[in-house]
């Protein structure tokens, strides 16, 4: 359960590199995928970038290949409309790098895509393993009863606090371990309250996400962005 978080962190690093590379030579890709959630990291974007890692190749892609790439990525609806939109963006006039520079950066793009595909597959496999194993744990039902805790997030919390019910003497001990209990310092008539710096960062972040997810239960509330 605990291994999924570092795997997801590695995937995010590769995704960040993939986002930054097109800024150097491939602005058409940034524009074409800007309307999609997760942009360049979506399966559709990855398939299109594998088919055309350079803007010159993208400008020559026929409609049939664009549609085929979207289908390989799993898209079911609006394939024709999206293919036409992406095709128009790819064929618009953009500032370009010299051909040799484009080819070199295109090779770098393909290398990043291979690494990102492997990282995405690893995270998905770990998520599937958690989905299968966590519900069998005796504490799964208790953790899932808290607002905002799905299987993945509940499994992260269980991995951090463990299943030894005697580990923490009381709720204050668990709060201190998670970093949600502030520290009060008093000297004479003066007292200060500060945040707790020494804590389990993984558990602290899981608690933050739990609070964000739980907020969506309330009318008019909004979901927090993952930090």
Image (tube, rainbow, N blue to C red):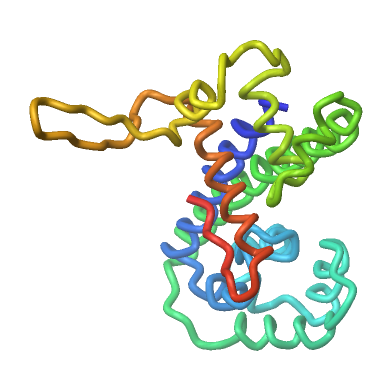
Q: How many marks?
A: 0
Residue drawn at 86 percent across, 25 percent down: 137
Please name whichever residue, 90 or 190, is drawn nearer the observer in this view of the structure: 190
Please name whichever residue, 166 or 18, is drawn nearer the observer in this view of the structure: 166
Residue drawn at 61 percent across, 66 percent down: 39
The residue furthest front is: 189
Q: Position of residue 171 (x, y in %)?
A: 55, 26
Please name whichever residue, 119 or 218, is drawn nearer the observer in this view of the structure: 218
Q: Position of residue 72 (x, y in %)?
A: 86, 62
Q: Quadrant of the N terminus?
A: top right
Q: Position of residue 57 (x, y in %)?
A: 65, 70
Horizontal relation, residue 220 to residue 204: left or right = right
Q: Is residue 216 above or below residue 160?
A: below
Horizontal relation, residue 165 to residue 100: left or right = right
Residue drawn at 75 percent across, 36 percent down: 143
Horizontal relation, residue 50 to residue 170: left or right = right
Q: Position of residue 158 (x, y in %)?
A: 70, 27
Q: Is residue 8 above or below residue 100?
A: above
Residue drawn at 68 percent across, 18 percent down: 162
Snapshot quadrant of residue 43: bottom right
Q: Is residue 167 above or below residue 28?
A: above
Please name whichever residue, 99 or 162, is drawn nearer the observer in this view of the structure: 162
The residue furthest left is: 188
């Amino acid at each position: 359960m605990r291994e999924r978080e570092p795997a997801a962190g590695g995937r995010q690093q590769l995704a960040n590199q993939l986002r930054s590379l097109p800024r150097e030579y491939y602005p058409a890709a940034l524009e074409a995928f800007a309307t999609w959630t997760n942009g360049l990291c979506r399966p559709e974007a990855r398939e299109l970038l594998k088919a055309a890692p350079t803007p010159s190749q993208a400008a020559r892609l026929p409609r049939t290949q664009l549609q085929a790439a979207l289908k390989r990525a799993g898209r079911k609806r609006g394939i024709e409309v999206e293919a036409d939109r992406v095709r128009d963006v790819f064929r618009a006039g953009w500032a370009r790098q010299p051909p040799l520079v484009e080819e070199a950066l295109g090779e770098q793009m393909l290398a990043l895509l291979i690494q990102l595909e492997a990282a995405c597959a690893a995270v998905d496999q770990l998520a599937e393993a958690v989905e299968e194993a966590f519900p069998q744990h005796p504490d799964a039902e208790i953790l899932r009863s808290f607002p905002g805790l799905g299987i993945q997030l509940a499994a992260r919390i269980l991995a951090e606090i463990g299943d030894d019910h005697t580990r923490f003497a009381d709720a204050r001990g668990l709060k201190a371990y998670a970093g949600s209990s502030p520290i009060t310092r008093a000297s004479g008539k003066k007292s200060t309250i500060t945040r707790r710096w020494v804590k389990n960062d993984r558990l602290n972040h899981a608690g933050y996400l739990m609070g964000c997810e739980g907020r969506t239960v309330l009318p008019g509330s909004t979901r927090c962005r993952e930090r």
